[in-house]
Amino acid sequence: MVVETSKNQIILNQIVGQKKESRLLETDVIVNDIKPDVLNIISTNGVVSVYKKEIMDGKVRIDGSINTYVIYMADDENGSVRSLNTSLDFTQVIDMENCRENMEAQINVSIKNFDTRIINGRKLNIKANIDVSVNIYSNETFDIITGLEKAENIQLLNNTQTITSLVGNGTNRVVAKDTVAIDVADELAEIMKVNFRIVDEETKISYNKVLSKADAIVEVMYLTEDNRINTAMTRIPIMGFVDIQNVNENSECEVQNNLSNLIIKPNSIEEHSIYIEAEIEVICSAYETREINMIEDLYSITDDIEFTKKEINAVTERNKICDVYTAHENIRIPELTGRVLDVQINPFINNTQIRNGKIIYEGNLSLEILFEQNTGINMRVVDLPFNFDVVSNKIEDKSKVETILKIKQNDFIIKDGTIEITVGIEFNISEQKNRLLNMIEEIKMEEAKECNTYSMVIYFVKPGDTLWKISKMFKSTVEDIAQINNIEDINKLTVGQQLYIPRFCKNKVVV
């Protein structure tokens, strides 16, 4: 006979695979006929967009592009500075052993560096070294037994567990547009370089919806018709709703904003302005933390019960931790004679350890400094290693962490050929704790085939015994054994202690 039970449903969102790989992308670029020949490469930069991901059994496919900007010294009489803009499209397949088609993937693609070489004055070879980070999540639904409809003569061992369950997830694509005015004295010739980053992310929850808000900071370096270099910057609001059934104010939300496409071009409608359009994929997951009084073990004092147990890896806690690493550095550049046009920061984590309530990071900051000198413009690359510890009472040695780095501050001052740079890197950490739980599945009960009776049962406590184990062994109850043996604390037994065990048979106590 199947025993009727009451259940509590949970959805476990777990990391089942993590991988980080370096990949090399390569393309050849032909210089446009209207541009002069290339004499020397000054710098190469780019902005990554991921417009498609496909999750398959054993692998993940990622499609994207890099808007690539090459600044070069022209082979002309004036030695002028010019630029090339190209799209470096890519398709990457990452092998993930535990990946399945119905799972989810969190993907991050970042540029480590470029290597641009001159094949001839009209042709360049561009190599981009990228880091691809993939986290695979499974969403499994479990029905946890929390009670029995008819529990007559059945003894239950309950255990209250704190479990974080997935409420739901969803995505939405939003488009952020803006027109950036430039100086009226500037006749825009070409766009030379673009920096793009998303900051100040926040969420608000309404009925069955999550409102995601952020800002996109876009910095554009451009060349004028009279060969001057200038910059323009704008801050574009990003706002979009993600539909998630049953999400409410008690839910905790994690949001990831990914750039899917970026268009930056001279405005064809308004003079002295630049048109910017960014397509953002907003990915949101909502969770709730509940205390569930689950049945850990059971038996009947009169009947035979059979059940199976399944081990599940439950998320018992999720936390968000944020900390900022600040670096101050004086960089001497003797050839610097004019402005610093741009300082681009690329942060990388090389090693992560969790120990003694802290996360220990080792990494480096790659600074690309574009500056003016007597002969035009030049670039200096500076690598700054860093060690940074994030301390929190939420961190345990077995915690699983995911870290996303964001540039919080990028300030610089020029003094006598020295650049004083202050860099702030925000560490956004998602921390979770997991615990293996034994979940009871279908319960069946049959009338006991045998019922041995004894006038008295005497038992001597062995190592590892508990009153529950002893009661289950003899089909007695914890309460009756404690009462007959005058045990005040049911959690304290002594090895060798003599116990009198009351026996049950056909609903009658036998002693």
Image (tube, rainbow, N blue to C red):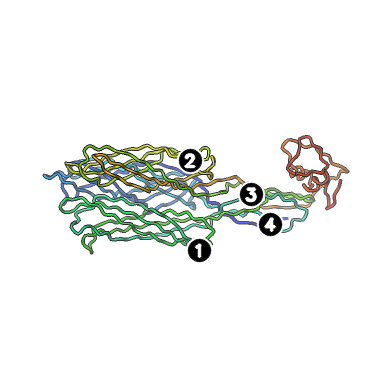
Query: Which numbered circle lies on residue 359?
Result: 2
Q: Nearer the viewer, residue 501 or 64?
A: 501
Asked if labels 1 and 3 touch by Cβ distance under 8 angstroms, the answer is no
Q: Nearer the viewer, residue 508 or 4?
A: 508
Of the two numbered discs 4 and 2 in the rendering, the one whose residue sits closer to the viewer: 2
Estimate the x, y position of residue 196 in percent, counting from the top left. 33, 52
* Residue at mark 3 to residue at mark 1: CA–CA distance: 30 Å
Of the two numbered discs 1 and 2 in the rendering, the one whose residue sits closer to the viewer: 2
Circle nearer the N terminus (2, 3)? 2
* Residue at mark 4 to residue at mark 1: CA–CA distance: 30 Å
Is residue 236 left or right of 304 when viewed as pictured? left
Q: Secondary structure at mark 2?
A: strand
Q: Residues within 10 Å of mark 2 (few under 14, many from 20)?
A: many
Residue highlighted by disc 4? 5
Q: Residues within 10 Å of mark 1 (few under 14, many from 20)?
A: some
Name the amino acid type tagged 2. Ile
Circle nearer the N terminus (4, 3)? 4
Q: Residue at image x 27%, y 46%?
A: 342
Q: Nearer the viewer, residue 447 or 177?
A: 177
Name the amino acid type tagged 4. Thr
